Image (cartoon, rainbow, N blue to C red):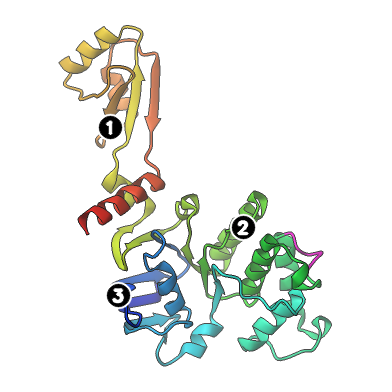
């Protein structure tokens, strides 16, 4: 697969800072992938995203996006990306649609037109489609100052998607959205990813969103401390296990010991699967069971363990 984002030895140090905010990190993102950058507050996520979206200068390192060098072709990069920042960046003196129109004009996607009706049909269809998906089609021509915080967030999403970017940078994109809007947005993003091979670069506090990522990097204190698919990250840290129980716990205890099946607790009994299936373990046990339940580790559990290990070793 083609590398649409390539980051080599990226460093960012702010003036008077004792440590690097981004400390020599390298990674790449393939075209059409959903890539998630995770980490606690102050880990370097937003700094990294700001550099990649050309809004913050790096200290050193090499970055290419959509084949363009960050140092030489920042304008070309901006034409090919969409960005939803964590903090709002709307002009409160304009209507919602005017915010979108000024955005695409400044990015050189469309020439200036003084009214919505004079804009190209493709632009008008896209604005109406996106505002409908996010539930603000009735407010799209109203002044921003009448919008709630959640509606402003929805408008920023509309604005970032209007020019059909090749790479979409999302910094906590669903913060402030109601559950239905959040669901509709992700359904739309996954559809765009599939049909248009749009690459999505995500930072989020909602780890269920990161569960859907093709690849994850976890950062802490400016460094990458873990990387891989969600499945790999979970498997490398936390074992799957089953909980079983029986009416005759004494008999079950003796049988597990006799069969050398390692368990913990006195009932219900916890048994690590250790690369075995639930069926394989249960089939060995002759004692009638009253309970069999599987525990599959979540990304949140793995994430918390990784961050804890990183903090304790630093």
On screen, 196 above or below 8?
Answer: above
Q: Quadrant of the N terminus?
A: bottom left
- Which residue in the structure is indicated by mark 1? 273
Q: Is residue 46 visible?
A: yes
Q: Earlier in the sequence, mark 1 or mark 2?
A: 2
In this rendering, position of residue 128 left or right of residue 297:
right
Q: Earlier in the sequence, mark 1 or mark 3?
A: 3
Q: Nearer the viewer, mark 1 or mark 3?
A: 3
Q: Residue at x 34, y 19 (%)?
A: 268
Q: Nearer the viewer, mark 1 or mark 2?
A: 2
- Which residue in the structure is indicated by mark 2? 176
Q: Position of residue 188 (x, y in %)?
A: 62, 60
Q: Residue at x 69, y 79 (%)?
A: 91
Tell me where residue 130 sits by quadrant.
bottom right
- Which residue in the structure is indicated by mark 3? 20
**Chief SS of the magenta region:** loop
Tell me where residue 147 sits by quadrant.
bottom right
Instruction: Measure how far apart labels 1 and 3 are at the Cα level.
Output: 41 Å
Dot 1 crowding, Cα within 10 Å, few <14, some 14–19, many 20+: some
In this rendering, position of residue 147 left or right of residue 312:
right
């Amino acid at each position: 697969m083609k590398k649409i984002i390539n980051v080599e030895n990226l460093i960012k140090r702010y003036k008077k800072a004792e440590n690097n905010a981004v400390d020599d990190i390298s990674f790449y993102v393939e075209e059409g992938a959903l890539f998630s950058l995770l980490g606690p507050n102050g880990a370097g996520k937003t700094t990294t995203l700001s550099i990649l979206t050309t809004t913050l200068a790096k200290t050193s390192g090499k970055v290419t996006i959509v084949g363009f060098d960050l140092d030489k072709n920042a304008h070309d990069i901006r034409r090919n990306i969409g960005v939803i920042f964590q903090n709002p960046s709307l002009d409160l003196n304009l209507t919602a649609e005017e915010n979108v129109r000024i955005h695409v004009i400044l990015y050189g996607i469309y020439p200036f037109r003084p009214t919505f009706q004079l804009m190209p049909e493709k632009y008008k269809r896209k604005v109406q489609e996106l505002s409908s998906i996010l539930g603000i089609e009735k407010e799209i021509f109203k002044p921003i100052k009448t919008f709630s915080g959640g509606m402003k967030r929805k408008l920023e999403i509309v604005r970032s998607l209007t020019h059909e970017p090749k790479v979409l940078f999302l910094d906590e994109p669903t913060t402030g959205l109601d559950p239905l809007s959040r669901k509709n947005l992700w359904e739309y993003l996954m559809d765009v990813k599939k049909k248009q091979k749009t690459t999505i670069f995500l930072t989020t506090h909602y780890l269920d969103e990161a569960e859907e990522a093709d690849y994850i990097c976890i950062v802490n204190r400016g460094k990458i401390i873990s990387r891989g698919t969600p499945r790999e990250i979970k498997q490398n840290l936390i074992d799957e296990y089953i909980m079983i129980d029986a009416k005759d716990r004494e008999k079950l205890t003796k049988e597990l010991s006799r069969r050398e099946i390692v368990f913990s607790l006195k009932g219900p009994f916890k048994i690590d699967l250790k690369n075995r299936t639930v069926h394989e373990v249960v089939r060995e046990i002759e004692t009638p069971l009253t309970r069999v339940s599987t525990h599959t580790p979540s990304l949140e559990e793995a994430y918390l363990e990784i961050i804890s290990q990183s903090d304790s070793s630093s």
